[in-house]
Amino acid sequence: MQATLEVCVDTVDGVEACVEGGADRIELCSALPLGGLTPSHGLMRAAAKCGVPAYAMIRPRQGDFCFNMREVALMHDDILAAREAGLAGVVLGAATVEGVLDEKALEILSEASVGMGRTLHRVIDTVEDRLEAINLAVAFGFERILTSGGAPTVREGQNALAAMRVHAGDRIEIMAGSGLTAENLGEIARSTHLRSFHASCSVPVELDHKISGFGFSSKAERQTSAQRIRDMKGVLKDLELAERSRK
């Protein structure tokens, strides 16, 4: 299986860095410091033309993933907007207060996204039984699941990620994300045997203190780096070469 790198971005500059750095797929968001919210229609249209498959995050607000039906209706319409913009797919998820995936919400959102690619996002890290959630994701036709193994970072969730990969088998792709860097990617790949990865590939940037003082920006910000993407792709290439040499 070829190793792939998905990069999450929330600006058009981030989209361009993904093209320049050679990302395999883009997760298109707004508000990445909040874990990613639904991007604007304009950003969707721009990403659809970039030449790299882009999936829009469908998440109407920060916080938990227990959405009421008004919020599900918003998400339904945002999926239609992503389709109209020409994006390759969507990233979504919903849970109940009981700590399981929200099947009613997922049915509505899955029907809206028929014919598009679909990723189940890290809602799976918040549920009680991740293995059962994998079964449900398969039943709903998701392509892949983004997860840290139920831990704050992939490094802490390595054992769970490996177990999720075994449970998923060939039914669905498990994509590791949260805290991945070029420095730890090889370790995570070798310990989990996963070949699908997700990262921000970002670097800190200097901000205008006057603008942040007015409240027009946060006091700290990060920017997608084409070089960070190239570095991570280089690690994946080395892993693939090592695997071929062992065969």
Image (cartoon, rainbow, N blue to C red):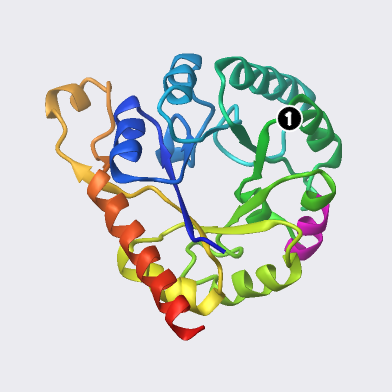
Q: Which residue is mark 1?
A: 115
Above or below, 201 against 18 in this view is below
The x, y position of residue 109, in whole percent, is: 76, 30
The x, y position of residue 50, in whole percent, is: 40, 27
Q: Residue at x 30, y 68 (%)?
A: 183
The amino acid type, in three-letter code, at marker 1 is: Gly
Q: Residue at x 45, y 29 (%)?
A: 30
- Horizontal placement of 175 versus 234: left or right? right
Above or below, 246 against 54 in this view is below
Query: How many circles with numbers are drawn on the protein?
Result: 1
Indicate whether residue 74 is drawn in magenta.
no
The x, y position of residue 2, in whole percent, is: 52, 61
- Horizontal placement of 51 versus 91: left or right? left
| Dot 1: element | loop
Q: Quadrant of the N terminus?
A: bottom right
Q: Residue at x 45, y 14 (%)?
A: 42
Q: Which segment is the magenta one?
A: 129-136
> Residue 62 or 21: which is nearer the viewer?
21
Q: Residue at x 43, y 41 (%)?
A: 8
